[in-house]
Image (cartoon, rainbow, N blue to C red):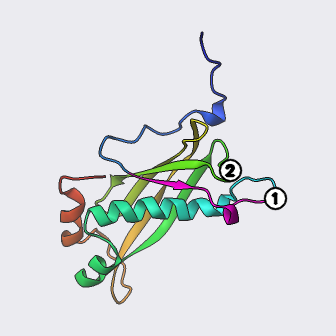
């Protein structure tokens, strides 16, 4: 038996997560859904943040680590393509991996609906680095670059 082809909106637009991707799993809580039982699109940023935080922690680049190094990260761009909805109590896996690290840090994401076996969303965020005083770093500083390039997750 063959399955019907996925509609164009449900097909991945990006390469799949590499084996080194970091993933977090979560259950969509009741406060995240609207009257139709669908997770509000604005909550997806938080889901991505959970995966991004896990990835950066694995690289010893969490908020406390950055402060100790004298730097900060700021999101400068974000993009998310929604393919199918997440609903109340759905289980989701959010994968995150590094795509670019030289002058900016780009992290790609894939959100899978584990309950329904469907791709829910995929996208990316771009972060820039600033000094603790807020001065933009035009290149990723060496102590951060070293941690991003080291073998490990992401």
Q: Which residues are magenta?
A: 23-34
Measuring from the top left, give residue 89's x and y in whole percent.
64, 52
100 within the magenta span? no
- Disc 2: which residue: 87
Residue occupying the point 24% across, 83% down: 68
Measuring from the top left, give residue 147's x and y in whole percent.
21, 64
Residue farthest to the bottom? 133
Of the numbered discs 1 and 2, the one sitting upstream in the chain is 1
Residue farthest to the top? 1
- Disc 1: which residue: 35
Q: Are marks 1 and 2 in contact (CB under 8 Å)?
A: no
Q: Secondary structure at mark 2?
A: loop
Residue occupying the point 31% across, 52% down: 154
Q: In the image, 151: left or right of 54?
A: left
Q: In the image, 53: left or right of 114?
A: left
Q: In the image, 32: left or right of 100?
A: right
> Mark 1 and mark 2: span between their CA atoms?
11 Å
Residue occupying the point 41% across, 61% down: 52
Q: Image quadrant for the N terminus?
A: top right
Q: In the image, 13: left or right of 39?
A: left
Measuring from the top left, give residue 79's x and y in whole percent.
55, 55
Mark 1 surroundings within 10 Å by alpha-carbon count, few (fewer than 14), some (14 through 19), many (20 or more):
few
């Amino acid at each position: 038996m063959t399955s019907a082809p996925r509609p164009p909106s449900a097909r991945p637009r990006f390469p799949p997560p590499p084996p080194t991707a970091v993933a977090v799993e979560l259950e969509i809580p009741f406060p995240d859904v609207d009257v139709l039982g669908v997770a509000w699109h604005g909550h997806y940023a938080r889901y991505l943040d959970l995966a991004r935080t896990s990835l950066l922690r694995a690289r010893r680049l969490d908020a406390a680590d950055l402060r100790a190094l004298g730097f900060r990260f700021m999101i400068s761009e974000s993009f998310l393509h929604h393919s199918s909805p997440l609903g109340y109590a759905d289980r989701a896996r959010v994968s995150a991996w590094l795509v670019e690290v030289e002058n900016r840090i780009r992290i790609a994401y894939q959100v899978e609906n584990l309950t329904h076996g469907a791709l829910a969303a995929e996208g990316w965020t771009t972060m820039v680095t600033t000094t603790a005083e807020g001065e933009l770093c035009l290149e990723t500083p060496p102590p951060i670059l070293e941690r991003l390039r080291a073998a490990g997750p992401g």
